[in-house]
Amino acid sequence: MNKPDIRHINFEQLQDWVIAQGLPKYRAQQIYDWLWLKNVASYDEMTDIPKTLRQQLAEHFDIKNIQTQSIQISKDKTIKCAIRLFDNAVVESVLIPTSSRATACVSSQVGCSLDCKFCATAQLKRKRNLDYQEIYQQVYFIKTLAKEKYNLPLTNIVFMGMGEPLLNYSNVMKSIEMITSPKGLGMSPQRITVSTSGIAKMIVKMADEQVKFNLALSLHSAIEEKRRQIMSISESNTLEMLANALQYFYDKTGTRPTLEYVMLYEFNDSIKDADALVQFCRKVKSKVNLIEYNPVDNSPFKRTTKERLENFVHYLEKNKIIVTVRKSRGDDIDAACGQLVNKNTLAES
Ligand code: SAH
């Protein structure tokens, strides 16, 4: 018989179950803390729960956990983890350390249904959405790893791993609810960034729900025809639709969205491209994050040069645009942005 997963029932349901077993209510809180605060892998680890109750729990509920399949450490200390999910599908999660803190980059889908021409994950078909606990457990795992390996606190989370988070909306939202809840990881939503390829109606939905986390949009070109060449999602989500949705997001939430822009050599890195970006920024209160392109097998693109990057940055700054440059991290182990493709496990899938 298929037992329900214990992390799939909410606190009230767990409490009802505990009461129905004739047990004191406070047991529900204890069990819940073990499940979320401490993220235990088995009932046996619930040391202050009587053995008989642990057995009852095991009879009624499954307790599912992600497993680490492998970890690779880059020379810049970035760690890429292949994570085995509940059904043995594999995704990748990345730990990105600085000297004082760590960021977790998590996946939201197995593979991806989009076909962005510069992204390795696009070479994998989308197999399924991740369950919210699979996302939560990735964060928990990276947090533990950051402490164990580098003695660093996990301070930031980016939904920039495999998949398009807004195409797995409810699980992503539910995972963020638990990541930010004091009953879960208790992190600040301001430390979380959801990155999207740009689905205007979902951006509007998030704005209406007045989410508190940060939003990043993968823009990559502010010239319509060019954007269409590299991101087919832009056919149904034009620049105008995205500009309106982002401005709406800013008006509703007060959070300035980030525009991500991968610098592709002689494709989108000229002054003409920078000027189009400036015009786009004039319509939307935003900030720009330029990203170094990370090489992907079978891709026609190349990383821009230092000089072209500097000229581009200079042009944006001259026009009073807030701009930062994201340096590549972990590219020697294919852990950098856009390189997550399960290389080590592809043969099996
Ligand atoms: N699907 C989401 C999140 C995943 S990608 C999105 O599209 O935003 C996270 C960021 O890495 C995005 O901005 C994405 O466009 C960028 N990216 C993809 N491939 C890249 C590559 N080869 N080099 C650098 N950045 C890349």
Image (tube, rainbow, N blue to C red):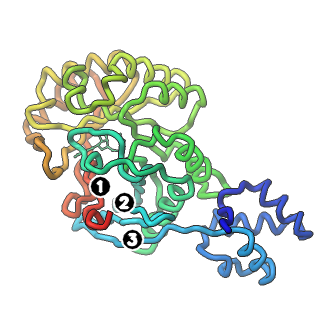
Q: Where residue 134 appears, x then y in whole percent?
A: 52, 58
Q: What residue type is labelled 2?
A: Glu
Is 276 rendered above or below residue 108?
above
Query: Measuring 25% from the left and 66% from the top, which residue is drawn there?
Result: 74
Is 234 rendered above or below residue 125?
above
Dot 2 or dot 1, earlier in sequence: 2
Query: Which label number is shown at residue 150?
Result: 3
Is 240 rendered above or below residue 345?
above
Of 180 and 338, the residue lying toward us: 338
**Mark 1 surroundings: few (<14), some (14-19) or many (≥20) residues within 10 A:** many
Circle 2 sits in a helix, a strand or a loop, which is it? strand
| Residue highlighted by disc 2 | 92
Report whether 309 appears left or right of 219: left
Query: Measuring 80% from the left and 81% from the top, which residue is drawn there?
Result: 50
Q: Which amino acid does label 3 sit on?
A: Tyr
| Residue highlighted by disc 1 | 340
Circle 1 sits in a helix, a strand or a loop, which is it? loop
Dot 3 or dot 1, earlier in sequence: 3
**Mark 2 surroundings: few (<14), some (14-19) or many (≥20) residues within 10 A:** many
Circle 3 sits in a helix, a strand or a loop, which is it? helix
**Mark 3 surroundings: few (<14), some (14-19) or many (≥20) residues within 10 A:** some
Q: What residue type is labelled 1?
A: Leu
Q: Quadrant of the C terminus?
A: bottom left
Q: Where residue 144 appears, x then y in whole percent?
A: 48, 69
Q: Where residue 245 appears, x then y in whole percent?
A: 45, 21
Dot 2 or dot 3, earlier in sequence: 2
Q: Where residue 145 appears, x then y in whole percent?
A: 44, 70
Query: Which label number is shown at residue 26?
Result: none
Q: Quadrant of residue 90?
A: bottom left
Query: Measuring 14% from the left and 45% from the top, which residue is drawn there?
Result: 299
**How many angstroms separate mark 2 from mark 1 (CA)?**
7 Å
Q: In which quarter of the image is the N terminus?
A: bottom right
